[in-house]
Image (cartoon, coloured by chain):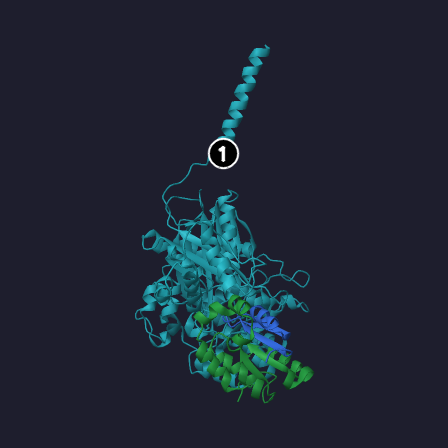
Chain colours: A cyan, B green, C blue
């Protein structure tokens, strides 16, 4: 079978202290209750500098400058063990500071909702004009357009519900609401959607810059974040995918948005694989931008424990799925794992549906997969918040299943946990941690022969939408390419049938004549 | 503990009283489980939610503590594997503290 | 202890989720009056 392949992956982070303070939902809720709350007073003291965010080891793993295995060797707490000589530029993308990002938000804003203060706009324009991959976006001319005075921005924030944008302690801009009454187009929603679009544009531009893929070659874009775009008559109407592709010059692409909470990216990858394998499209990009709502989500606990507010990163990723080239790792579309509606909610039922059911389908044991990438949340963020070490819990569950099935001995359980896993290195941006941060590293390791196969696992908490108590999850196996590209036999057979039919008709004709 | 859930627990307390109602937790981690148990017993220690300064006196148990009350096959199917994954003793000890 | 009691369930996405606890509590003969699952991620 000609499986589709993972042709490339890109990853980007944006440090977003202002958006953490003003658009993170934990802080919004706190402010609504009590503007003078202890948490809001203490939080600014816990914000990191941009330099600290760049040298934070898990962030360097996310953009590909160190591998998850190298990260494992760095002692905790990682925020006290910065990576010496860390760079904003990564093998898979970059870590962008918030001022440049506000400029990028203005560039991708089609409805003049992002206003920047005059002096600030001039500075970020200069920075973005020398940005290696953003300078050629034609919408950069938006940074030439009328900038606004500080007073004007202050007034919009104070009197017209505009969302403030701060940098270095100064009000440098705002995002206006897009409609007088429509809550689906409120300034808060618009800021979240524009930040999501901008971070997705950043990462897709990196994918295009770092791989052979040209924007014109992209046939289809699947966007898989957790935001909703629309007005009050169609709150989740979409379509982030085309909005992102438009800025990146993907003129031949169409696209759509796929949602399933944190499992969205895994669903999107399966859809991309299917579209490519069926021959409908040759090049499909799966992209997900970051979530402003989740910035500082657990910051109450981080502040209480005297830690930096580590949830200051907007995260984005993009993966290119293409036709089998005999080189890049394949997605085993014959062994897709899925949490079925009838699977049940118990952790063992979920893991069985997602891990062992697909393995059984192709006769693999749990130990035939070298690495599992379940939810890769950074434990330094989740442990103080009471969610424990999520990837570690997943490794223990997978290993416990392996013991139950007799794939490994009970005495070897912890050894298995050590060998099949990796430390979590993704920010708690919902859909971002779910398996996908490992795809770039896995692709490299598979190409270098350091791995035979890896499993990507996405899980989603559907019950948060209050429509069902169901859980969700999808998994897929990425495997080293055998190097054999099968000829497209389906087409040839059809041709052959036509030729034989024609020959028979001609033959019959000679008899009649 | 989630603010909306604090409100729901308060409503349930008003409806059923503290003798009939118990809270069962599924927390992954000792501290968070303890925090939930404390919140329904003596009030929200973080002073974030509706149970701030409200002492309901409700008893909370982690599902791990109720193993003997549940048919073995059901427990094994629904919870069994997580005994191998989470720190059962630490979680149970922490939750117990708030029933004294 | 559980029989005849009203039970409010606070499950955890990364621990034991609400619906799994619900199955246990019902099997033990108690009445589930509220069940939810918290998510910290």
Q: Quadrant of the C terminus of chain A?
A: top right
Q: Is residue B59 above or below residue A185?
A: below
Image side of residue B80 versus residue A210, left or right: right
Q: Quadrant of the N terminus of chain A?
A: top left
Image side of residue A176 versus residue A337, left or right: right
Chain where mark 1 sits: A
Is disc 1 surrounded by few (<14), some (14 to 19) or many (20+) residues within 10 Å?
A: few
Between residues A335 and A134, which one lies in front from this camera angle?
A: A335
Image side of residue A313 versus residue B2, left or right: left
Image side of residue B15 versus residue A38, left or right: right
Between residues A73 and A85, which one lies in front from this camera angle?
A: A73
Q: Is residue A410 above or below residue A453?
A: below
Residue positioned 43% across, 53% down in the render: A477
Label 1: state its secondary structure: helix
Residue A358: image x %, image y %?
Answer: 47, 53
Residue A84: image x %, image y %?
Answer: 30, 71
Residue B19: image x %, image y %?
Answer: 64, 85
Residue A190: image x %, image y %?
Answer: 58, 66
Can the viewer see residue A143? no
Specify the quadrant of the image occupied by residue C26.
Answer: bottom right
Q: Which residue is mark 1?
A: A491
Can the viewer see residue A234? yes
């Amino acid at each position: 079978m000609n499986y589709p392949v993972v042709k490339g992956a890109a990853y980007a982070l944006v440090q977003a202290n202002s958006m953490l303070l003003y658009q993170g939902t934990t802080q919004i809720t706190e402010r609504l209750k009590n503007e003078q709350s202890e948490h809001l007073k203490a939080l600014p003291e816990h914000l990191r500098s941009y330099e600290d965010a760049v040298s934070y080891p898990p962030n360097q793993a996310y953009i590909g400058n160190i591998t998850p295995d190298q990260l494992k060797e760095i002692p905790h707490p990682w925020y006290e063990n910065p990576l010496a000589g860390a760079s904003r530029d990564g093998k898979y993308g970059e870590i962008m500071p918030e001022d440049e990002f506000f400029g990028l938000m203005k560039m991708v804003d089609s409805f003049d909702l992002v206003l920047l203060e005059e002096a600030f706009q001039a500075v970020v324009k200069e920075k973005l004009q020398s940005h290696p991959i953003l300078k050629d976006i034609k919408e950069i001319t938006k940074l030439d357009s009328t900038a606004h005075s500080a007073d004007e921005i202050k007034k919009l924030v104070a009197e017209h519900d505009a969302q403030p944008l701060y940098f270095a302690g100064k009000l440098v801009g705002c995002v206006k609401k897009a409609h007088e009454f429509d809550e689906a187009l409120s300034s808060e929603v618009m800021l979240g959607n524009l930040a999501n679009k901008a971070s997705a544009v950043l990462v897709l531009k990196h994918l295009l810059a770092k791989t052979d893929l040209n924007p014109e070659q992209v046939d289809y874009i699947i966007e898989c974040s957790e935001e909703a775009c629309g007005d009050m008559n169609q709150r989740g109407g979409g379509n982030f995918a085309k909005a992102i592709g438009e800025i990146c010059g993907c003129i031949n692409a169409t696209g759509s948005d796929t949602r399933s909470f944190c499992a969205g990216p895994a669903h999107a990858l399966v859809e991309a694989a299917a579209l490519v394998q069926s021959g409908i499209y040759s090049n499909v990009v799966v992209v997900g931008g970051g979530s402003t709502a989740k910035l500082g989500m657990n910051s109450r606990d981080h502040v209480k424990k005297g830690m930096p507010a580590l949830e200051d990163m907007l995260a984005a990723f993009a993966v290119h799925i293409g036709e089998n080239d005999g080189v890049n790792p394949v997605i085993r579309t014959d062994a897709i794992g899925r949490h079925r509606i009838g699977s049940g909610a118990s952790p063992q039922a979920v893991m069985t549906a997602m891990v062992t059911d697909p393995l059984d389908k192709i006769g693999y044991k749990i130990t035939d997969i070298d690495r599992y990438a379940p939810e890769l949340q950074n434990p330094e963020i989740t442990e103080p918040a009471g969610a424990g070490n999520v990837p570690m819990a997943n490794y223990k569950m997978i290993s416990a299943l392996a013991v139950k099935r007799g794939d490994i001995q009970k005495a070897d359980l912890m050894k298995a946990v050590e060998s099949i896993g990796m430390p979590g290195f993704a920010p708690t941006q919902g859909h971002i941690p779910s398996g996908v941060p490992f795809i770039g590293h896995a692709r490299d390791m598979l190409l270098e022969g350091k791995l035979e196969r890896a499993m990507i696992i996405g899980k989603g908490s559907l019950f948060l939408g209050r429509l069902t108590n169901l859980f969700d999850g999808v998994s897929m196996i990425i495997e080293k390419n055998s190097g054999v590209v099968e000829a497209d036999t389906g087409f040839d057979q059809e041709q052959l049938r036509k030729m034989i039919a024609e020959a028979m008709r001609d033959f019959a004709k000679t008899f009649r004549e | 503990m989630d603010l909306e859930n604090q409100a729901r627990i308060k409503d349930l307390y008003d409806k059923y009283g503290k003798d009939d109602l118990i809270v069962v937790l599924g927390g992954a981690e000792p501290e968070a489980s303890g925090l939930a148990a404390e919140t329904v017993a003596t009030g929200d220690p973080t002073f974030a939610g509706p149970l701030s300064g409200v002492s309901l006196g409700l008893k909370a148990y982690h599902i791990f503590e109720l193993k003997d009350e549940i048919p073995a096959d059901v427990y094994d199917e629904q919870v069994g594997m997580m005994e191998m994954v989470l720190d059962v003793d630490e979680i149970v000890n922490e939750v117990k503290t708030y029933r004294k | 202890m559980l029989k005849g009691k009203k039970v409010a369930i606070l499950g955890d996405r990364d621990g034991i989720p609400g619906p799994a606890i619900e199955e246990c509590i019902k099997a033990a003969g108690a009445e589930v009056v509220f069940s939810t699952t918290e998510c910290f991620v």
